[in-house]
Image (tube, grey):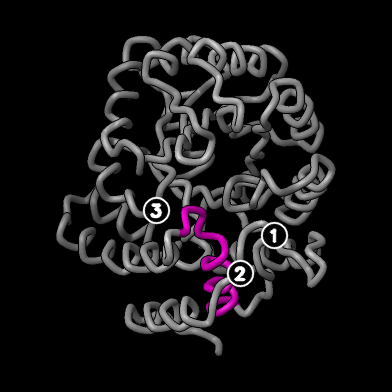
């Protein structure tokens, strides 16, 4: 698959869906379908990602993740591509979940580096090799060192790019803002069509300058149109407009990281509710819910950047 073919199929804004819960922290699949319909009707993204980091994959059971895939595929009904987040702590479970995704009719899986165990680069390579050889699906590597504890080094990505069905990488760029350039340099001779996406809203502008083809954006639940405008303005050479449109997104992202929160879900979820009116519920424990002070800052931020909220 060439880069042009990838963007023609999946677009430039890949949205990792939040997972709605009821008051007992049970997954609300009907609400999930409602959220998907809202996002499609408002054209806020090009593709959906099920059970990614924004979907709190590490806090879901295997069966919940499979049912969310099934719900997404059924609800989307071919209107937009669905990508499955299938990464788990173990290679064995990652392979099993990837096979379930294929059974659901999903042909692209985003596989996060194995978490908690801190494997070596050889361990990371062996993990992805085993997954790639076990499936007919295409694989998008997912690098997010701040959560999983290990970085997929550029040399390892170059080795993995030799597999026909490992077609690209999503890089959570915050830990190393120039790593996307490292990935381009490492893979250009191995696979000149290797897909490289930014995975950090707050790094959108710096990474598209480096050549990132698009973004995996939780913020697209709210700012999908603005993100599209930023990307198109940059591609058209209107860098002032791109910068001007980026500032509100940047301010929102900063508000989601209040009090040292690394995973923004606890604040992003209420933001989604305030803007869409869809009750997705608080994050699952152990993530602490938003505080009243944090909510005030969030509302003030959204209001100051011109976003209408439903109080």
Mark closer to the chain start, 2 or 3: 3
Does residue 154 lie above or below 198 as drawn? Answer: above
Mark closer to the chain start, 3 or 1: 3
Q: Which residue is mark 1?
A: 284
Across and down, in percent, residue 187 comes to 36, 16
* Gap in angstroms between the C-alphas marked 2 and 3: 22 Å
Across and down, in percent, residue 87 comes to 65, 32
Q: Which residue is mark 2?
A: 289
Is residue 211 a member of the stretch shown in magenta? no
Across and down, in percent, residue 250 comes to 32, 62
Q: Which residue is mark 3?
A: 201
Classify residue 70 as left or right of residue 45.
Answer: right
Does residue 117 lie above or below 263 as drawn? Answer: above
From the image, state whether disc 2 or disc 3 is nearer to you: 2
Residue 215, disc: none
Which residue is rendered at x = 58% and y = 47% of the image?
53
Could you tell me which secondary element the residue under label 1 belongs to?
loop
Quadrant of residue 184 in the image?
top left
Which quadrant is home to the C terminus?
A: bottom right
Looking at the magenta stretch, what is its main secondary structure?
Answer: helix
In magenta, the rendered stretch is: 261-276
Is residue 267 a member of the stretch shown in magenta? yes
Across and down, in percent, residue 304 comes to 33, 82
Quick check: can you spot residue 180?
yes
């Amino acid at each position: 698959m060439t880069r042009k073919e990838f963007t023609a199929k999946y677009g430039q804004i890949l949205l990792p869906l939040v997972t709605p819960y009821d008051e007992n922290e049970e997954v609300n699949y009907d609400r999930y379908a409602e959220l998907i319909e809202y996002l499609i009707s408002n054209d806020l993204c090009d593709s959906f990602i099920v059970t990614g980091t924004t979907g709190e994959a590490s806090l879901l059971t295997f069966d919940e993740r499979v049912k969310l895939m099934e719900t997404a595929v059924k609800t989307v009904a071919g209107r937009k591509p669905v990508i499955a987040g299938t990464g788990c702590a173990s290679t064995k479970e990652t392979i099993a979940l990837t096979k379930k995704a294929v059974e659901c009719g999903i042909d692209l899986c985003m596989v996060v580096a194995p978490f908690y165990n801190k494997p070596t680069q050889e361990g990371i390579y062996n993990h992805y090799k085993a997954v790639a050889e076990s499936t007919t699906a295409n694989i998008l590597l997912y690098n997010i060192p701040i959560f999983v504890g290990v970085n997929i080094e550029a040399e390892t990505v170059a080795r993995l790019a030799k597999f026909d069905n490992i077609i690209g990488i999503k890089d959570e760029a915050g830990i190393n803002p120039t790593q996307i350039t490292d990935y381009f340099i490492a893979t250009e001779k191995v696979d000149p069509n290797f897909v490289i996406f930014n995975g950090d809203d707050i790094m959108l502008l710096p990474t598209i300058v480096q050549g990132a083809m698009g973004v995996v954006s939780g913020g697209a639940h709210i700012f999908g149109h603005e993100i599209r405008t930023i990307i198109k303005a940059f591609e058209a050479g209107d860098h002032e407009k791109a910068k001007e449109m980026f500032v509100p997104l940047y301010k929102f992202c900063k508000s989601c990281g209040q009090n040292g929160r690394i995973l923004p879900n606890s604040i992003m979820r209420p933001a989604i509710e305030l803007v869409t009116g869809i009750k997705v519920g608080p994050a699952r424990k152990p993530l602490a819910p938003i505080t009243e002070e944090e909510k005030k800052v969030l509302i003030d931020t959204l209001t100051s950047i011109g976003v209408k909220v439903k109080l």
